[in-house]
Image (cartoon, grey):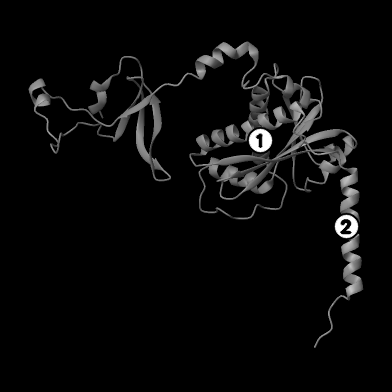
Amino acid sequence: MSEPLLSRAELAAIVDELAEARAEQRARRVPALDAEDDARHATARRVLENLAREQARAVASRVQHRVDGRLLSIEELRAAEAAALVLAEDRLVRFSLPGGEPGWVLVSRPLLFAWMRRAFGARDDAGAPPPVRPYTPIELRFLRRAASEMVERLAALAGCAVVPAVGPIESGAALREQRTARLLVATFAFSGLDEVGRLRLLLPRGWLGEAAAAPRGTTMPAAGSLANAVLETPVRLSVCVGTARLTLAELAALRPGQVIPIESRRDGSVLAHVEGAARFRAMRGAVEGRLAVQILERLGDEEDDDGLAAS
């Protein structure tokens, strides 16, 4: 019988060392945001949970594929500890809140590359590992634009009167320079872009107060509340695939089982109506087994159903 690689005493020493390391890490870490009796924490969590859902919906609409987003955790870390989350090849997008305090968006490389593949219509390399190299200028522009949209969405949900200014793209050294600054680190998981990816928002501690000051349910700055209420009004979008002309006598004589020939556009397009008025020309299709239309062009007020048979 072969001898074990480690003796019982060596195994016990390793276990004790790990336990001491974890205890030391907990002692250095600022308490996590899980206090149910603190209204500010509850408000911040609600804003960030809404952010995860809205960001996922926005990405899904853009790439025409189902995307799910959820908030995994919120914790307070010192900037030096948060820097340990940043890999050598990762890049952070800095943004500034109205008070001048900086925050950062950190998109994991697997999520960013999967996001880009979907955005640019690629499918054949799904699941391929992300390349280990510096980001190209095109990838950095995509990263900055994605971060900017998410920061704007966060500001709207938190009821910020001013949208944070998005600044430069930086490495983890930017966090190490801050060292003892206290940050709220919100970790999100997004699935549906070929694999589950992580995204982190590193927010200044003062943001918690701004989020708590926003009224419950706030989704836009107060100055735009009326415009937002109008924009949030639901309308019915319907699609007309063809038309048929019948006399009143023919209409009265219709019975179950009868077949009515319809006329449609020769190019296969359809008309999309908003509250009964034709507003868009579209093409029929399917997304994940569900019927769907792709908008091709906006129609003028003069075009109606009579133009459906046109080429």
Residue 38 picture location, percent across and down: 77, 29
In this view, the residue in front, 11 or 273, is 11
Q: Residue at x 70, y 16 (%)?
A: 161
- Furthest toward the bottom, the residue is 1
Element class at badge 1? helix
Residue 170 screen position, x and y as percent: 78, 37
Q: Work out which quarter of the rendered image holds the N terminus and state it.
A: bottom right
Q: Earlier in the sequence, mark 1 or mark 2?
A: 2
Q: Is residue 95 visible?
A: no
* Amino acid on which disc 1 is placed: Arg
Give the image location of residue 7, x and y in percent.
Answer: 89, 76
Residue 20 falls left or right of residue 94: right
Pick whichever, 22 or 157, lies toward us: 22
Residue 81 visible (yes or no): yes
Pointer 2 local density, CA inside 10 Å: few below 14, some 14–19, many at least 20: few
- Residue position for label 2: 19
The amino acid on which the numbered mark 2 sits, given as a three-letter code, is Ala
View extreme (front): residue: 37
Task: Give the camera-side residue of 53 and 268.
Answer: 53
